[in-house]
Image (cartoon, grey):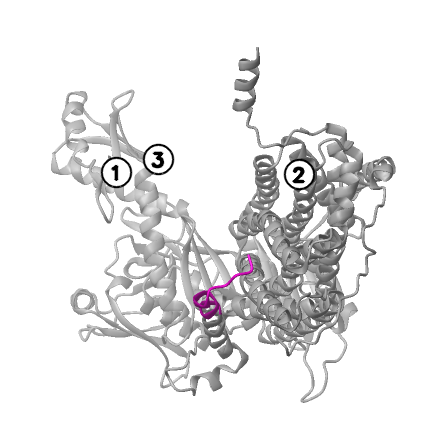
Amino acid sequence: MQLLPHFKGRHFIPEGTSIDFMSLRQVCFWTSIAIMIGAAALFAVNGLNYGVDFKGGTMIELRTKAADGGTAPPADIPALREAIGSLDLGDVQIQEFGQPSDVLIRVEQQSGGETAQQDALNKVLGVVGDKYVQRRVEVVGPAVSSELRTTGLIAVLASILAIITYIWLRFEWQFAIGAVLALTHDVLITVGVFSLFYLEFDLSTVAALLTILGYSVNDTVVVSDRIRENLRKFKKMALPDLLNRSINETLSRTLMTSGTTLIVLLSLYFLGGEVIRNFTFAMLFGVIVGTYSSIFIATPILELLGVKRDWSGITKDQQAAASAAAS
Amino acid sequence: MLHFSPFKMVSIGVLCLAALIFAIPNMFDRGTVQSWPSWLPQKQISLGLDLRGGAHLLLSMDTEELRQDLLTSLRADARAQMLRAKVGIRATGINGNSVQVRVARPEDEQRALTELRRLSQPLETAVFTSSENNITVERGADGIINLTVTDAALRKRVTDAIGAAIETVRRRVDPTGNVDATITRNGSDRILVQVPGIDDTKALKERIGKVALLSFHAVHPDVYYGGGPIPPGYRALPSSEGPGQQYLVRSNSVVRGDDLVDASPDFDERTRAPQINFRFNQTGGRKFGSWTSANVGRPFAIVLDGEVISAPIVQTAILGGSGRITGQFTPEEANNLAINLKSGALPAKLTVIEERTVGPTLGADSIRSGISAFIIGSIATLIFTVFVYGTFGIIAVVGLLVNAILIIAAMTLLGSTLTLPGIAGLVLTIGMAIDANVLIYERIREELRNGKNAVEAIDTGFGRAMVTIVDSQLTTLAAALIMFWLGSGPIRGFAVTLSIGIFTSVFTAVTVVRLLVSLWLRAEREKSRTVDVPI
């Protein structure tokens, strides 16, 4: 242990902050509500750019064949567009993917059942020719895509339900309501951003949403733990002050953990490759929103709902027995 | 909180060392690891198809075909039963899941009912005889007797068919036995095929989906079907040689593909056209031999999945039990067909309902970018942590490294699969694992601010933070478990690394980091009476 250099860490958050978060409550509530309505409206009007997982259809990633030892030449997208356009496969999107030599082709789900999707794939691969190598092929038929839609929705709802139940058992119902509102807020706004930029929404986005839920509630639980501790400690303190104190006490932890998580997510976003870029984007965005919501949504809700002040460890039965004895 | 018995210290040390030993093979190439002496651990994390490259195919069986088969054979059984009992019947038909039998004379109806009830038998499963029967027999209106197939019987038919199909598909995917393919049942009527290392799945799909039911039939003297009523006992089947051409062939086959023991692709010696050589087993050979000797000079039809592939004339009796199939094949088709015939027919058609294929170049790129994101992300986190927490930051970093080693060792030993989202989960875990340390250290800082001395502050810091750590990690674990249930391959990989990471990060925070802090504290107290906590 003598080997360890002895040096102090730096506090990048000043010690003992006392920011009045509760006074910002009104502004934050209304801003959040406005953004949520905006996100819901976007979702209703714009919809989501569902990937093949949920919409069915075909996705093909191609790269041009490189001459021996050389780099892959840029792809001729107009030529591909013309060749594939003549196949009469309905809505077809062809775009560059990550670098000029890579192309992503998306073909909408074909009518005519499961085999029609495979036929479409064969047609596309037939006209693409031997100038390209296949990097990735995904074909999802109508049966699987409808199942994935259902499981995706159930998964998000089940996670929220599991989290509410846990918080309700562990804390009080007011905390559970605060947490669930914060979670809904996070999910809705993330979905809204996906709708706004028309980013592809697929199974991995749902996985990212679930991770955001886990992360956001993690933050909320840490603050709630501190509120409960302070409720026991300061029985007479006014609730807004107590909530403020709890947020301030946990602030450096909240920002430190968000910081390290954002660092790794940024590294994943820029270095992790094109395939998981949407996935990391959703998480990157979600971590920021999740941190915001646990401070500005989940906690102020408690003030609105009020919480039980007496946490001296007396159970309800004992209280009832005590009051019965007194009368 | 800060006391560790020597036994505890040694166990923690041994555990970390063991994890390191099991994690090390992952740092090297597979080839290098295999050349190590056998007493060293050689197991590596298995990579998912998205990193290794390969094909993931989900096949669905045509259950409607199975249902039709079941009803057709039930109808035949009912007719045979009535014939045996000498009950005259006017007609039989199929309606929904029922076979309907109309008795010719009303006075026979009771006897017919008794006889048909004998067809109803308890279903047998592998372990026990179930209480349900295969069919129910009931008297309907107008002298009709309904034989209805039970749902349990239909389900059992599908289960059995999938079981048989898995074996057939295995032989078709991997005829030589050296591909590392996994073929598993998925749900009630699906098969999941995962084949690493292939990027063009066209040939594979053509090979595995086909029923490949081969049969040899006698051909009607007219040979072709020219319209009008089909003579009884015959069927008009399309020819694969040209559209619109139909052969008239006998419904009952002479020999079926079940009697084949071998099939191999070959070329005609004279014309170099691709062909398939086959050999019958003894029964098949005998049947084919006696039929061909009685029918020299007549045509016979070779039928594959309801299509006549060729209809040659019998030149001489074929007694050796072997022969060849010629037709209009490409060499590749001949090869696929030979594999299909040898593997046996599928109980029903299989359709690809989901396909995910990753080429080897993309897989290699993903591994490379995943590793660089992991290294850069980890280094940045470590620098940041040391910057914020000083000496204790270094201890946290040691904890993180132990954590990463534990995750890799656990994944290696559990045999779980690492996918690209799994690498993302690993990187994310590094970022979030710090959370446990952050909670502890922030608590220590607070206790120090409240005027506690070093020992007290560190002790309460670990104690108080513990509750919060467990509370907050349990919720992430819940989300990860739901993801595991939700996901297919890659997403599951993410859920697995995330879950393992939660356990290991809590473990390292409460054992390794706590041990290191207590050792540091002991050393400091030997130096001076008051300890300055560098945090």
Q: What residue does disc 1 label?
A: B134
Q: Position of residue B88 (x, y in %)?
A: 17, 31
Q: Do the residues marked 1 and 2 share a common chain?
A: no
* Screen quadrant of the N terminus of chain B: bottom right
For residue B407, side relative to residue B116 (left or right): right
Q: Chain of mark 3?
A: B
Q: What residue does disc 2 label?
A: A228
The amino acid beneath tag 2 is Arg
The amino acid beneath tag 3 is Asn
Image position of B149 with respect to B532: above or below: above
Mark earlier in primary sequence (1, 3):
3
Q: Chain of mark 1?
A: B
* Screen quadrant of the C terminus of chain B: bottom right
Q: Which residues are magenta?
A: B1-12
Q: Position of residue B81 (x, y in %)?
A: 16, 38
Crowding around mark 2 (Cα neighbors within 10 Å: few <14, some 14 to 19, many 20+) is some
